[in-house]
């Protein structure tokens, strides 16, 4: 689906899509794959702490939260020149060493959710931190269990992408990266395998663009 001439999103399996791509098709991949946390995802607050999170059934989360295998990361590195991978600390056996992690300080205080999330990066440079509360960007509920703020992705793009970079996202989720890319004029291709999330995310992105057009 072409949202704009620069934002393209697909309801497809990202691994199957990547296997058809040429080497180095994208300048930068910014991805947030499932970490495979299982019960920890729910007990840590990802379901109970998000209000009407699409009223997900336990089997929905269980089906969704399957960590990718080595083949996924091999293909990701093949089709993109550089990578920023959320939850990379869970996949070090596949990713190897990094100069430094990117840290999202979620400013959670004492609630049961994690205080921060880490992103592995192939780009040179030391560890850097972005601080923003996880319930931000003006929404009261989330449409995806691991929804991240648009401002977080804008920070990543501002600091780690060049103006003419082509961006790849293999796990679109809530679409925050698509909104950030639209706001900043980046070219994005993104994939989301789950039909329900894809439809909710498509609406979120289109509503955002329509609102900007109105003003």
Image (cartoon, helix red, strand yellow):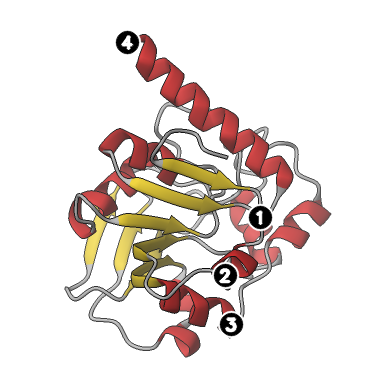
Q: Are marks 1 and 2 in contact (CB under 8 Å)?
A: no
Counting from the top left corner in percent of width and height, residue 197 is at 66, 43
Label 3 vs label 2: CA separation?
Answer: 14 Å
Going from N to C along the chain, the mark reached first, 4 or 3, is 3
Q: Which of pointers 4 and 2 indicates the residue nearer the eye?
A: 2
Label 1 vs label 4: CA separation?
Answer: 33 Å
Going from N to C along the chain, the mark reached first, 1 or 2, is 1
Secondary structure type for disc 1: loop
Q: Which of pointers 3 and 2 indicates the residue nearer the eye?
A: 2
Q: Quadrant of residue 134?
A: top left
Going from N to C along the chain, the mark reached first, 1 or 4, is 1
Counting from the top left corner in percent of width and height, residue 198 is at 64, 42
Label 1 vs label 3: CA separation?
Answer: 17 Å
Residue 212 appears in the rendering: yes
- The quadrant of the image that shows the N terminus is top right
Which mark, residue 71? 3
Residue denoted by label 2? 20
Q: Residue at x 54, y 30 (%)?
A: 204
Q: Residue at x 66, y 47 (%)?
A: 47
Residue denoted by label 1? 12
Q: Residue at x 75, y 44 (%)?
A: 56
């Amino acid at each position: 689906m072409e949202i704009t001439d620069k934002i393209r999103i697909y309801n497809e399996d990202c691994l199957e899509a990547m296997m058809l791509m040429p080497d180095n098709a994208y300048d930068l991949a910014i991805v947030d794959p499932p970490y495979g946390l299982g019960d920890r995802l729910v007990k840590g607050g990802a379901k109970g702490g998000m209000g009407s999170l699409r009223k997900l059934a336990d089997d929905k989360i269980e089906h969704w939260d399957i960590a990718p295998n080595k083949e996924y990361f091999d293909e990701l590195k093949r089709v993109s020149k550089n990578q920023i991978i959320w939850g990379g600390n869970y996949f070090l056996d596949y990713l190897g060493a990094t100069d430094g992690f990117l840290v999202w300080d979620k400013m959670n205080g004492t609630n049961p959710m994690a205080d921060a999330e880490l992103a592995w990066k192939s780009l040179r440079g030391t560890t850097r931190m972005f601080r923003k509360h996880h319930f931000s960007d003006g929404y009261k509920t989330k449409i995806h269990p691991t929804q991240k703020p648009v401002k977080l992705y804008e920070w990543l793009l501002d600091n780690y992408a060049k103006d003419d970079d082509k961006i790849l996202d293999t796990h679109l989720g809530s679409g925050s990266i698509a909104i950030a890319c639209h706001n900043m004029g980046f070219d994005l291709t993104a994939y989301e395998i789950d039909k329900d999330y894809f439809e909710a995310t498509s609406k979120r992105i289109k509503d955002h663009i329509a609102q900007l057009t109105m003003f």
